[in-house]
Amino acid sequence: MKPIDLRSDTVTLPSEAMRQVMANAKVGDDVYGEDPTVNRLEALTAEMTGMDDALFVSSGTQGNLLALLVHCERGDEYIAGQQAHNYKYEGGGAAILGGIQPQPIDFSADGSLDLNKVRAYIKPDDSHYARTKLLSLENTQGGKALPMSYLQQAREFANEQRLGLHLDGARVFNAAIFHRVSVAEITKPFDTASLCLSKGLGAPVGSVLCGRRELINKARRWRKVVGGGMRQAGILAAAGIYALENNLDRLTEDHQNAADLAQGLEKIAAIRVLREENQTNMVFVQVPPGTAEELKAHLKAQQIIIPTGTNLRLVTHLDISGVDIPRIVEAFTRFFVTIQNGC
Ligand SMILES: *Cc1c(COP(=O)(O)O)cnc(C)c1O
C-alpha cells in the first residue's frame, strides 16, 4: 500500500524527472556568483515576485533570518504574530545571532496582524525602548491566505510608520492560487519576501529571499556569515526551477484534495473540522481527548501518517492524489465507528 503522509507538505520526494534535471544541471562556484543555474533561479524568482533581486538560501528559516538581519540591527525590534514561524519556530535565531528582539502580537482570525494593534506596540523613540524597525507578516498563515486589500494597507502603514515590511511567504504560492492572482501581486508591496521551494512545490531543498536590491546585497553578505554560502548549489537550484516550472499550477489539486478531505471528515460526528480554516492545502481537525494515540496507531497500520495530538493539522501535497482522499476518510470513519460501538 502506498503511504499517505499528512503531516506536512515538506515530506514530498523528488520525482524521477526532477532528479534528472538536478543531475544534468550546469554548475559553478556560487560564492563567486558563477553558478549559472543558481543565477537562473534567482532571476526567475525575482521576476515572479516583482522584486529587484533574489538570493538562493538553504531553508525558509535561513531566508527569514537573513531578512531580519538586513532590516534590523542589534537593539532593534520586529513585530510578528504570536504563532509566526519567524518568532516561534526558528529557535530564536534573530535574538541569538542578531541581538534583535521580537514583539509578538496575536494574529487576527484571517491571519493578518491588526494594524491598529501593531501601531500601539510601536515603541517611542526613547532610550528605554528597543527601536521598532520591521513589520513581518506571514502568507499563508495557518493555511489561510491574507486578504489582498490588507497587503496594500500594510504597505501604506509601513510607509507612514517608517517600518520595513517583510513577508514570510513559505507558502505564498498557495496564497496566489487561492486568490487566483500572480505571486507578484502578493509580494510586490513588501521590501523582502522569503518563499520555500521545498514545501508544496516539491523540491528537496531550498528557499529564496527576494527583495529590494540593496537589501538582497546585504543579505548575501549575511548568508556567508551564517555559513550559507554554497558552492555548486546549481544542483539544488535546478530542482527549484523544475518545481516552479512544473508544480505550481497543480497546487489547485492540493487545495481541492484538502477541501474534499474536510468535507469527508465532517460527516464523522465525533470529530470537529474547522471549515473556516480550510482555504488552501491544510485541514484542521479536533479529535476527542483520549482518542488521539489510538487513532494515530489505527491509521499508521494502514500506512496513513498523521501528527500527534488532538488538534490535527492535515496537509495535502504533491505525493497525495485525489484517489487517496476516500481512503483517508474511510480509515478515519472506520476508527470512530469502531470506538462508538465499544469494540
Ligand atoms: C516551513 C516554514 C518556514 C521555513 O521552514 P524551513 O523548514 O526552514 O524551510 C518559514 N515560515 C513558515 C510559515 C513555514 O511554514
Image (cartoon, rainbow, N blue to C red):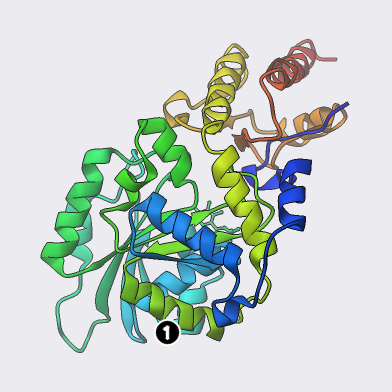
Amino acid at the residue labelled 1: Gly
Q: Position of residue 30 (x, y in %)?
A: 60, 75
Image position of 70 (left or right of 335): left
Position of residue 19 relative to residue 278, above or below, is below
Q: Position of residue 65 (x, y in %)?
A: 48, 71
Q: Closest to the observer: 74 or 159?
A: 159
Which quarter of the rendering shows the N terminus? top right
SS at mark 1 in the image: loop
Instruction: Name which residue lies at 57% across and 26% down.
Output: 253
Q: Position of residue 139 (x, y in %)?
A: 40, 47
Instruction: Name which residue lies at 34% across and 78% down.
Output: 72
Answer with the quarter of the image where residue 71 lies. Answer: bottom left
Q: Is residue 89 visible?
A: no
Q: Position of residue 111 (x, y in %)?
A: 36, 44
Q: Is residue 98 visible?
A: yes
* Residue furthest bottom in the image: 127
